[in-house]
Amino acid sequence: MESLEEKIAHLERTTDELSSVIARQDTEIALLTRQVQLLLDAEAGRNRSEGAHIFGGNERPPHY
């Protein structure tokens, strides 16, 4: 019985550690996603002011 309790305690600790890693990664991914969107918006604005066109991913390029 003691062996099972030790294994459960170890699994609970591992689960808590993984949960905190996932939470940290979720926050980091959200931040990186926001930064990429800001960069895309800035580049699109710069290209519009220069008369160029940037594809945002939802459009088909003119050669299709």
Image (spheres, rainbow, N blue to C red):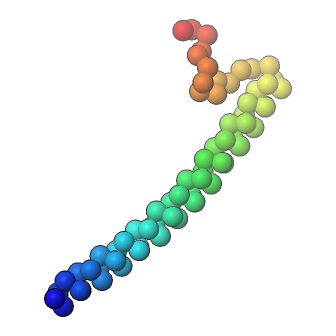
Does 13 sit above or below residue 32? below
Instruction: Give the quadrant of residue 46.
Output: top right
Q: Residue at x 50, y 60 (%)?
A: 25
Residue at 63% from the left image edge and 43% from the top image edge: 36
Question: Residue pushed farthest right?
Answer: 49
Quarter occupied by residue 38: top right
Q: Is residue 7 found left or right of 55 in the rendered image?
A: left
Residue occupying image coordinates x 76% and y 26% = 47
Q: Is residue 56 above or below residue 27?
A: above
Name the side, left or right, on which 31 lies relative to 47. Answer: left
Quadrant of the image for the C terminus? top right
Relative vertical location of residue 44 with respect to residue 24 in this rendering, above or below: above
Residue with the most extreme bottom position = 2
Horizontal side of residue 49 vs 4, given as left or right: right
Which residue reaches farthest front? 1
- Seen as rendered, the residue at the extreme top is 63
Q: Percent x, y for residue 62? A: 61, 10
Using the image as rendered, state which of residue 9 and residue 41 is in the foreground.
Answer: 9
State the residue at coordinates (73%, 30%). Answer: 44
Q: What is the x, y in percent for residue 2? A: 18, 91
Q: Quadrant of the N terminus?
A: bottom left
How many marks can you see?
0
Q: Nearer the viewer, residue 17 or 43?
A: 17
